[in-house]
Amino acid sequence: MPRDLVIRKLTGQDATLVQEFVRGLSPRSRHERYFSAISELPPRELERTTRPANPSDASLAAFDGRGLVALAECAGGEIALVVTDALQGLGLGHELMQRLLDHAQRARLPGLHGLVRVGNRAMLHLAASFGFRARPSGDPDLVRMELALADACS
């Protein structure tokens, strides 16, 4: 993971940075994360991302000084993360996943889960490296990844 990054929880003041980040993702990365060709987050999702309503929810972001370069979320045990294309494969996703796992354990969540596109090999590999197990999702294009926190490896 690049050393000059700062990872912290998002606040409502980060909404503009989050939108700039989403707009700057490649169409492939937006599709892998949001399962559609969005160009920016709808207001309701932006609000949920920057102002989690539940104390057991968290939105984390990595910043490189110029802006947001990665986003990781945990809401009701459902997780999702995306890293800007230029930094993919450098360990940032692993660091964010570990921080989501640490947060979930502190929040005493029973488990984590998330939907991953079948072709998103990087995310499937990352999740499997943390002990997530693949389950059918009911959608042939998506896999449900599940992790009981008692099974989690740190």
Image (cartoon, rainbow, N blue to C red):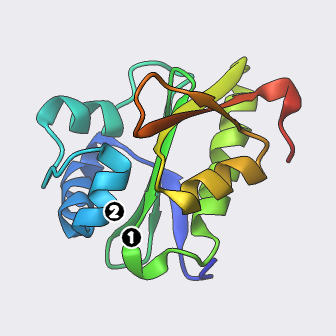
Q: Earlier in the sequence, mark 1 or mark 2?
A: 2
Is residue 110 shown above or below 141?
A: above
Residue at numbered disc 1: 84
Position in image of residue 73 (x %, y %):
47, 41
Is residue 48 shown above or below 110?
A: below
Q: Which one is nearer the viewer's eye here, 151 or 9? A: 151
Is residue 84 shown above or below 47?
A: below
Position in image of residue 119 (x %, y %):
46, 55
Residue 73 visible in the current orientation: no
Q: Amino acid at mark 1?
A: Thr
Residue at numbered disc 2: 29
Q: Left or right: where does residue 16 sit relative to residue 78?
A: left
Q: Which one is nearer the viewer's eye here, 38 or 42? A: 38
Mark 1, other Cα within 10 Å: few <14 / some 14–19 / many ≥20: some
Q: Are marks 1 and 2 in contact (CB under 8 Å)?
A: yes
Give SS at disc 2. Answer: helix
